[in-house]
Image (spheres, helix red, strand yellow):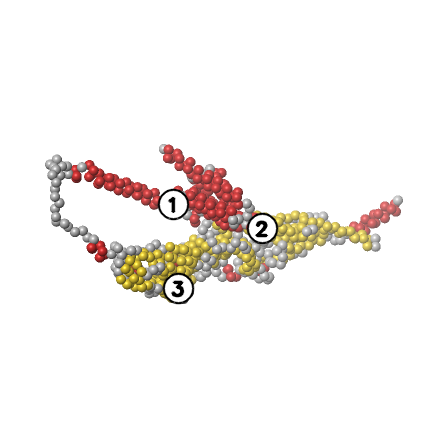
């Protein structure tokens, strides 16, 4: 019995002596693979504690980073028996989760655990890491192309970082007055999913006339910027026309973007893993400066004001006319540029004096495209031949400035030879129809003259013939002045007609829904909702934000539940607009909710006006 106890004691001693010595090892893990750690990125330092039950303490600080979490993430043990000799080892893994905050090269360690010191680890953050291995900087770090000119580099506001930013570009940084320029806002992102994009304000174009283009990205593309691959999309495009010479500015607006951020962690069994975490970013594109040059001088006397590339054509259906009868000639200007501001010469000064010309209101059909404004402007002139004969309608020249060549150029519409015959209302026929005086007196019959005769001027009927027209005229003037006053305030007119305009836009949305055109449906729904709010609240488009609209509706004493339903519907439509096709959802409930919300708002506005009218 004693021998057995002694043998057992010896085995325990041998086993205890064969246990491996305690050790602590530190290692750095970057969940983004070989790409350098950037400011704002998560990375990890692992503690591998071997053969000791002592636990490391959570460090109070780590150079260049913020401590997020510290916990034991794994353990392991092993037993080995060789030729009767048994050895045992065990280890614990602790993971320190960090967020990089400062650029530079840093060292962490050594740390002491149970009297045993660990090794030290080195890591680089931001620009110092980008100089050693490829990859774009994260966070507020900018690429060399950005740093050389702060006016063209992206800005980051709020939680915006190098994983998502906006970049504004203009087709040319130098242009002539009235020259069409393209201003675009492009989104760059490395996030897995974008759930919502909404502008909280409009860009500020100082000294420009602006045409908004609907030609924006409907899907993501991939582009390398600063050595890093981003998913990109054009989220805004404008055609802008500078109106004055000098240095003009375009100030970027703020966008709210909702994304899914990946949080990485290390699992001892599965390895590096990640989980999606919702994140809202407020970002703005860079501001731009444009140098605007004046048009070359001297300008031609018949300069039309057009800047771009244009062509003019004429159309005269017939060449035979009658005097004193109206006819028509059409001039059509087509091309690209500031089409809405093109003017034709004074045709009364060009046409023969025997032709009287009446100036029309041009009909402009302009299309705001991807790179310019193009279309046609139709000038339908009426003219009247005053005499019979053969006359020449001269060629009409359109003088415009072409920015591509830097010169004034001319396009010519051909003229016509016309033949004018005598009309029924000619001058000579009118002279033949003049009244003549017959001096012969008519005989007077007996009894036709009487001393009791009352002159017609003294009768009531005579004076009513004057009084009634005057009263009608005064009534018409009063009505016309009231009509002018009621319609002088365009915002008030739009406010009264807001519900009618919203119904028209909702009908377009219903048509798109029947055709199963989801993208156009949500565009029309947003146009109906924002258009109704802008017209009803008398707010310009640049001020239409959720905060402003909510404040205006609360001031108008609209019930809070109606306001919240309207804002929720706007968010739902804007989310569905940018969502993938599979997530567009059922359009019918959205349409029904839009109709009910507008009806509720309209009813609330009417109830607000009723007490005032009763008083």
537 up-or-down from 290: above or below: above
Between 464 and 281, the one nearer to me in the picture: 464
Which mark is first along the chain, 3 or 2? 2
Which mark is first along the chain, 3 or 1? 3
Q: Residue at x 63, y 51 (%)?
A: 274
Q: Residues within 10 Å of mark 3 (few under 14, many from 20)?
A: some
Q: Secondary structure at mark 2?
A: strand
The disc placed on residue 402 is 3
Q: Residue at x 54, y 50 (%)?
A: 579
Q: Are marks 1 and 2 in contact (CB under 8 Å)?
A: no
Q: Position of residue 78 (x, y in %)?
A: 76, 51
Q: Residues within 10 Å of mark 2 (few under 14, many from 20)?
A: some
The total of numbered circles placed on residues is 3
Distance (Cα) linking label 1 and label 3: 38 Å
Between 400 and 199, the one nearer to me in the picture: 400
Between 541 and 87, the one nearer to me in the picture: 541
**Which residue, given by chain and number where applicable, does mark 2 sit on?**
261
Between 504 and 284, the one nearer to me in the picture: 504
């Amino acid at each position: 019995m004693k021998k057995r106890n002694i043998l057992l004691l010896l085995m325990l001693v041998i086993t205890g002596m064969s246990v491996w010595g305690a050790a602590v090892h530190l290692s750095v893990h970057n969940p983004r693979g070989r790409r350098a750690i950037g400011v704002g990125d998560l990375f990890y330092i692992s503690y591998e504690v071997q053969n000791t039950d002592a636990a490391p303490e959570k460090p109070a600080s780590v150079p260049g980073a913020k401590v997020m979490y510290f916990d034991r993430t794994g353990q392991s043990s092993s037993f080995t028996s060789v030729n009767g000799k048994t050895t045992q080892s065990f280890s614990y893994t602790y993971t320190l989760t960090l967020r990089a905050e400062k650029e530079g090269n840093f060292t962490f360690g050594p740390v002491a655990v149970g009297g045993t010191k660990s090794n030290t680890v080195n890591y680089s953050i931001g620009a110092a890491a980008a100089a050693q291995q490829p990859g774009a900087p994260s966070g507020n770090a900018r690429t060399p192309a950005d740093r050389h000119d702060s006016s063209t580099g992206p800005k980051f506001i709020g939680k915006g970082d190098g994983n998502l930013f906006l970049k504004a570009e203009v087709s040319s940084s130098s242009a002539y007055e009235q020259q069409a320029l393209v201003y675009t806002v492009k989104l760059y992102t490395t996030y897995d999913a974008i759930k919502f994009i909404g502008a909280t304000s409009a860009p500020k174009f100082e000294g420009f006339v602006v045409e908004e283009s609907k030609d924006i990205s409907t899907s993501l593309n991939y582009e390398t910027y600063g050595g890093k691959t981003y998913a990109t999309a054009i989220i805004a495009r404008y055609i802008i026309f500078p109106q004055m010479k000098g240095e003009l500015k375009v100030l970027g607006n703020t966008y709210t973007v909702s994304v899914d951020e990946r949080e990485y962690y290390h699992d001892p069994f599965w390895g590096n893993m990640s989980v999606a975490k919702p994140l809202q970013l407020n970002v703005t594109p860079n501001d731009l400066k444009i140098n605007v040059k004046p048009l070359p001088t001297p300008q031609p006397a018949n300069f039309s004001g057009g800047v771009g590339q244009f062509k003019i054509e004429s159309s005269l259906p017939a060449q035979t006319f009658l005097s004193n009868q109206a006819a028509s000639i059409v001039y059509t200007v087509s091309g690209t540029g500031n089409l809405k501001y093109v003017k034709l010469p004074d045709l009364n000064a060009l046409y023969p004096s025997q032709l009287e010309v009446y100036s029309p209101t041009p009909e402009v059909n302009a299309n705001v495209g991807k790179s310019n404004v193009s279309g046609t402007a139709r000038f339908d002139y009426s003219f009247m031949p005053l005499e019979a004969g053969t006359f020449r309608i001269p060629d009409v020249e359109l003088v415009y400035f072409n920015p591509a060549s830097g010169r004034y150029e001319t396009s010519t519409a051909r003229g016509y030879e016309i033949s004018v015959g005598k009309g029924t209302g000619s001058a000579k026929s009118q002279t033949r129809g003049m009244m003549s005086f017959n001096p012969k007196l008519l005989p007077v019959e007996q009894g036709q003259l009487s001393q009791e005769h009352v002159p017609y001027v003294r009768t009531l009927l005579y004076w009513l013939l004057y009084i009634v027209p005057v009263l009608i005229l005064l009534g018409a003037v009063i009505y016309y002045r009231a009509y002018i006053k009621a319609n002088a305030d365009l915002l008030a007119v739009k406010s009264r007609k807001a519900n009618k305009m919203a119904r028209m836009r909702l009908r377009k949305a219903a048509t798109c829904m029947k055709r199963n055109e989801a993208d156009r449906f949500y565009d029309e729904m947003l146009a109906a909702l924002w258009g109704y709010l802008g017209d009803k609240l008398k707010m310009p488009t640049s001020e239409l934000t959720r905060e402003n609209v909510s404040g205006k509706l609360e001031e108008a004493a609209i019930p809070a539940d109606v306001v919240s339903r309207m804002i929720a519907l706007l968010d739902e439509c804007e989310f569905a607009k940018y969502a993938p096709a599979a997530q567009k959802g059922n359009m019918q409930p959205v349409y029904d909710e839009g109709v009910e919300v507008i009806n509720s708002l309209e009813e609330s506005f009417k109830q607000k006006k009723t007490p005032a009218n009763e008083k």
